């Protein structure tokens, strides 16, 4: 929890923070890694603003070839902080304080998950695995040729071979 009492009382203009999040198992594609989060809450004449940056280094599994690979991710965000919401305010635009504190670990974790890619690829042109024999197509063509005949249509193959 990031204590904001000094910021609310006007003793300081900014309250910095730094933390490390463990990314192991955060999604089914992430094997291991860490995310460094750093930022600050600063006071303005109208409100308090939370500004943070995420810098992540982790190992993920490729969605096409199923091989683990190292990748990185960076994201920065900024939210106004409120003690409570007015009835007409959109709660997605604000971060709410709990007393005079913010749970920055939860906020950074949510932003990390919301901004990760939907799937991870070891490279843009990854060919993946053969759907028939499971061979890695990045290493070369597979021996099966990738052709699997639907058993319901097997009799038609015999007809065309006559």
Image (tube, rainbow, N blue to C red):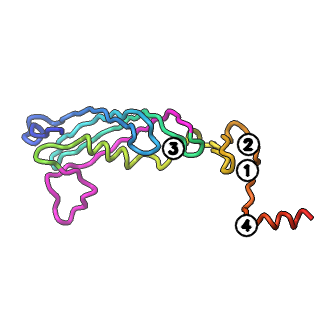
Q: Residue at x 53, y 34 (%)?
A: 69
Q: Residue at x 47, y 50 (%)?
A: 118
Whether 88 is drawn above or below 62: the answer is below
| Magenta stretch: includes residue 87 | yes
How far separated are the C-alphas under marks 2 and 3? 23 Å
The quadrant the C terminus occupies is bottom right
Q: Residue 143: give x, y in percent of width and height.
A: 76, 43
- Please state the extent of the stretch shown in magenta in the rendering: 67-96
Badge 4 is on which residue? 152
Residue neighbourhood size for the residue with mark 2, other residues' Cα within 10 Å, grouped as few (<14), some (14–19), many (≥20) = some
Q: Disc number at residue 37?
A: none
What is the secondary structure assignment of the residue under circle 2?
A: loop
Label 3–label 1 contact, CB within 8 A: no
Q: Residue 33: give x, y in percent of width and height.
A: 41, 33
| Magenta stretch: includes residue 140 | no
Badge 3 is on which residue? 120
Query: Is residue 59 or residue 72 the one in the foreground?
Result: 59
Which one is earlier in the sequence, the residue at label 2 or at label 3? 3
Q: Please give left or right for residue 84 compared with residue 120 in the image.
A: left
């Amino acid at each position: 929890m990031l204590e904001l009492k000094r910021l609310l009382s006007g003793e300081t203009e900014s309250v910095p923070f730094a933390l490390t999040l463990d990314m192991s198992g955060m999604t089914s594609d992430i094997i291991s890694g860490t995310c460094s989060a750093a930022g600050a809450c600063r006071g303005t004449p109208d409100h308090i603003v939370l500004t943070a940056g995420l810098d992540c280094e982790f190992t993920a599994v490729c969605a096409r070839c199923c091989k683990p690979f190292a990748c990185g991710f960076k994201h920065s965000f900024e939210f106004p902080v409120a003690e409570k919401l007015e009835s007409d305010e959109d709660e997605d635009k604000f971060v709410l304080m709990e007393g005079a504190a913010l749970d920055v670990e939860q906020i950074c974790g949510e932003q990390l998950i919301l901004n990760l890619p939907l799937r991870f690829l070891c490279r843009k042109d990854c060919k993946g695995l053969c759907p028939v024999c499971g061979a890695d197509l990045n290493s070369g063509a597979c021996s099966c040729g990738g052709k699997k005949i639907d058993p319901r249509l097997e009799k038609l193959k015999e007809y065309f071979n006559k």
